Image (cartoon, rainbow, N blue to C red):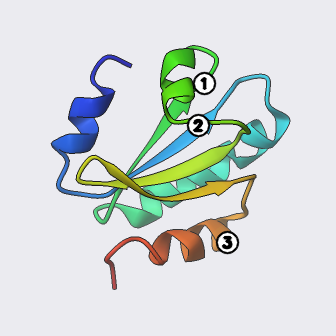
Amino acid sequence: MPNFDRHLARNDLPVVVDFWAPWCGPCRMMAPTFHQAAIDLEPYARLVKVDTEAEQQLAARFNIRSIPTLAVFKGGREIARQSGALDLGSLKRWLQLHLHQP
């Protein structure tokens, strides 16, 4: 993901990253939830997915040890992290702790 750092640093909105892999059952199970959260939380945050299988260097750089792992970035800096699959309500509650939204 060549533009990853630039995307994080130049985004005025918080960026929520889902570190996942295609072979990960819990990751696949959470994919529709993450997609719905992306719709629901627009325009308060940008939600993106990073395939740790395809982007192994990026996953290593962020010390991703288990997937799915969610990370919230503001101004290019990681401010929160959560490992494990979440249902939509739990995901949105966790994100609301870190996003400025009504």
Locate the C terminus and report the quarter of the image it occupies: bottom left
| Residue 29, above or below 3 | below
Amino acid type, mark 3: Ser
**Residue at figure coordinates x 56%, y 25% from the top left:** 60
Q: Which structural element holds mark 2?
A: strand
Please give the label number shown on residue 81: none
| Residue 102, above or below 39 | below
The numbered mark, 3 or 1, whose residue comes first in the sequence reads 1
Amino acid type, mark 1: Thr
Please give the label number shown on residue 90: 3
Q: Which structural element holds mark 3?
A: helix
Q: Quadrant of residue 14?
A: bottom left
Amino acid type, mark 2: Phe
Locate the N terminus and report the quarter of the image it occupies: top left
Q: Give the mark toward the camera: 3 or 1.
A: 1
Please give the label number shown on residue 52: 1
Question: On the rendered structure, is 66 left or right of 6?
Answer: right
